[in-house]
Image (tube, grey):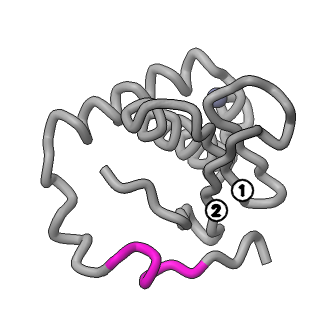
Amino acid sequence: MKIPEHLKIGGLIYDIHFRDRMTSGYRTGGEIFYGDCCVEINNDMSKRYKEQTFIHEMCHAIMHQIGRDDLKDDEAFINQLANTLYGIVVDNPGIFHEIYDTEPAQRIKGEGCV
Ligand SMILES: [Zn+2]
């Protein structure tokens, strides 16, 4: 799995950043900043953890995008959804290849929320 530099969800484009130190100062795998359309992923993790964290933060963003504020910060729900989705991606290699005929960075330009 290749974690993209930008992720478009609905009308918003999230910038994905890898950080050696998280902006918040917390020791966590990832964080999402909804207002800034930004996701941070901790660089000090294995490739698989980074991938799973990316899916986790994506699930937060999806719940935010569809207006489910009651679920967007429900970590137990997000973990169940994200871990299941990540399992599908890992256990079914190639499932999305047809739609990746160009590099993700060429298709989506980071623009933040503006
Ligand atoms: Zn979370």
Confirm or reject: label 1 Cβ below 8 Å from ligand 1. no
In magenta, the rendered stretch is 103-109
Q: Which amino acid does the dot numbered 2 rest on?
A: Tyr
Residue for point 62% across, 38% down: 42
* Element marked by disc 2: strand
Quick check: 57 above or below 80?
below
Return the residue at label 2. 14
In the foreground, 66 or 41: 41
Residue for point 34% across, 34% down: 86
Q: Residue furthest top?
A: 76
The question of residue 101 being in magenta is answered with no
Q: Residues within 10 Å of mark 1 (few under 14, many from 20)?
A: many
> Is residue 5 toward the left or the right of residue 103 in the image?
right
For marks 2 and 1, the one nearer the N-term is 2
The location of residue 12, given as percent across then percent down, is 65, 68
* Element marked by disc 1: strand
The location of residue 46, given as percent across then percent down, is 43, 31
Residue for point 81% across, 60% down: 36
The question of residue 105 being in magenta is answered with yes
The location of residue 64, given as percent across then percent down, is 68, 46
Q: Quadrant of residue 51?
A: top left
Q: Quadrant of residue 41?
A: top right
Residue for point 71% across, 56% down: 38
Distance (Cα) linking label 2 and label 1: 5 Å
The location of residue 58, given as percent across then percent down, is 54, 46
> Is residue 18 toward the left or the right of residue 69 in the image?
left
Return the residue at label 1. 38
Q: Quadrant of ligand 1?
A: top right
Q: Which amino acid does the dot numbered 1 rest on?
A: Cys
Mark 2 and mark 1 residues within 8 Å of each other at the beta carbon: yes
Quick check: 45 above or below 19?
above
